[in-house]
Each structure stands twice: as structure tokens, then as C-alpha cells.
Image (cartoon, grey):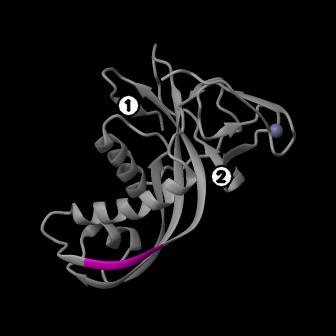
């Protein structure tokens, strides 16, 4: 894919942002504002940047952006609902709950890898004191936009629930997106596209 140089202004301070990655998330070096823009307008995003907490030897860390989506799920018809939602609801009998769903804002060549990282972080959300910057490390190009992320949240809930073997027979639920933030997690590529988080 040819690299496009995007030049735009920070919506907060007016500083020029140059982005060579064609990312959908734009970072202002001057005032640390993160924003995304689409046909609906400009959205300044709340974000967290995880510190690097593991050794990485001679490899070069990079940051992967995740959408962190606060979802409210209500089940109103089910037969043997699986472990996914009930784990997140923290109770077997609960029929509704609010939780954070994590989803890479990066489209992986293998969609299963994308799904696996979404599952891993949703089931055990990372906890860390946020950094103020990326420490000079690169960011992966975000290419799943804010609106696709909200639609994909629905897809993932159903997918995760259905993949628990031998439990789910049918389910009817509503999913409402309450809030959406960005979380940057440091990774290294340990070879052959195998990614390892540094938190
Ligand atoms: Zn700025």
C-alpha cells in the first residue's frame, strides 16, 4: 500500500500533525491530543498509553491501538447461555451487565488473530498507570474506525458467546455502546508475525 502523507491541524491547539501511516488516529506531539475524524466530524478521544513492563531484548516495541468500548448487554431470551457473558456479568444468574470490550483498531491479515486479542484483553483487562507519550516508539496504523468498532462489538459478543462449546443454544439480547476510548498497548513481534504484549 502506498504511504500517504496526511497533514492536518490539531483540533485542540492548531499545531500541524503529519502522519505518514494513513492511520485513523491522529496524535498531536505538541499538546498530546488524540483525535479521529470521519464524515461525521472530528472526535477528540480519551486515551491511555500502557507503559512497557517487560524486557524486550534486541527487539523494537511498538504500540497497538485498541478501541475500549463500554457496552451494556441485556439478555432477554436464552437457552443455556455460555460462560462468556456470565463471566463478564460476574454472576451466573445475572441477565444484564456493563463491561469493557477491547478490540484491536488494527485490521489483522488473519481475522482470528484480531479476534484472539479482542478476547484476551476483554477477559482480562489490562491495568496500568498511563504514560503521557509513546516514548519514541512507533504506533501501528489504526484502520478500524469508530463506527465499525461499535458494529464489531456486537459481532464479537455473539461470536464469543457462541464459541463456548456445548452451552449456547439460542440467545436474544440488546447491546448498547455507552462510551468508547482508545488504549495503546506495547507489543513486540517475536518472529513470523507472532506478537507478544509487553504488559
Ligand atoms: Zn495539539
Residue at 42% from the left image edge and 56% from the top image edge: 122
Mark 1 — residue? Answer: 195
**Is the CB–ligand 1 distance for label 1 below 8 Å?**
no
Pinpoint residue 157: horizontal percent, then vertical percent. 36, 64
Pinpoint residue 174: horizontal percent, then vertical percent. 42, 78
62 sits left or right of 75 in the view: right
Residues at marks 1 and 2, CA–CA distance in whole angstroms: 33 Å
Classify the position of ligand 1 by quadrant: top left, top right, bottom left or bottom right: top right
Pinpoint residue 106: horizontal percent, then vertical percent. 47, 40
174 vs 155: above or below: below
154 vs 92: above or below: above
**In this view of the protein, which residue sits in the foreground, 176 or 185?**
176
- Mark 1 or 2, which is nearer the eye? 2
Q: Quadrant of residue 141?
A: top right
Name the outermost residue toward the top: 58
| Mark carried by residue 39 | 2
Residue at 64% from the left image edge and 44% from the top image edge: 130
Pinpoint residue 74: horizontal percent, then vertical percent. 41, 80
Amino acid at each position: 500500500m502506498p504511504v500517504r502523507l496526511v497533514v492536518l491541524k490539531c483540533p485542540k491547539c492548531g499545531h500541524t500533525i503529519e502522519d505518514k501511516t494513513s492511520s485513523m488516529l491522529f496524535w498531536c506531539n505538541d499538546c498530546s491530543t488524540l483525535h479521529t475524524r470521519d464524515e461525521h466530524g472530528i472526535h477528540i478521544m480519551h486515551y491511555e498509553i500502557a507503559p512497557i513492563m517487560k524486557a524486550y531484548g534486541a527487539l523494537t516495541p511498538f504500540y497497538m491501538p485498541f478501541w475500549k468500548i463500554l457496552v451494556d448487554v441485556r439478555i432477554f431470551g436464552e437457552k443455556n447461555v455460555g460462560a462468556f457473558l456470565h463471566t463478564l456479568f460476574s454472576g451466573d444468574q445475572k441477565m444484564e451487565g456493563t463491561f469493557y470490550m477491547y478490540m484491536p483498531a488494527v485490521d489483522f491479515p488473519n481475522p482470528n488473530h484480531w479476534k484472539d486479542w479482542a478476547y484476551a484483553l476483554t477477559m482480562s483487562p489490562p491495568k496500568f498507570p498511563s504514560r503521557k507519550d509513546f516514548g519514541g516508539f512507533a504506533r501501528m496504523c489504526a484502520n478500524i474506525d469508530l463506527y465499525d468498532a461499535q458494529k464489531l462489538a456486537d459481532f464479537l459478543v455473539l461470536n464469543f458467546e457462541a464459541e463456548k462449546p456445548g452451552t449456547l443454544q439460542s440467545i436474544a439480547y440488546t447491546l448498547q455502546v455507552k462510551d468508547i476510548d482508545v488504549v495503546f498497548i506495547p507489543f513486540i513481534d517475536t518472529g513470523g508475525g507472532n506478537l507478544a504484549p509487553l504488559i
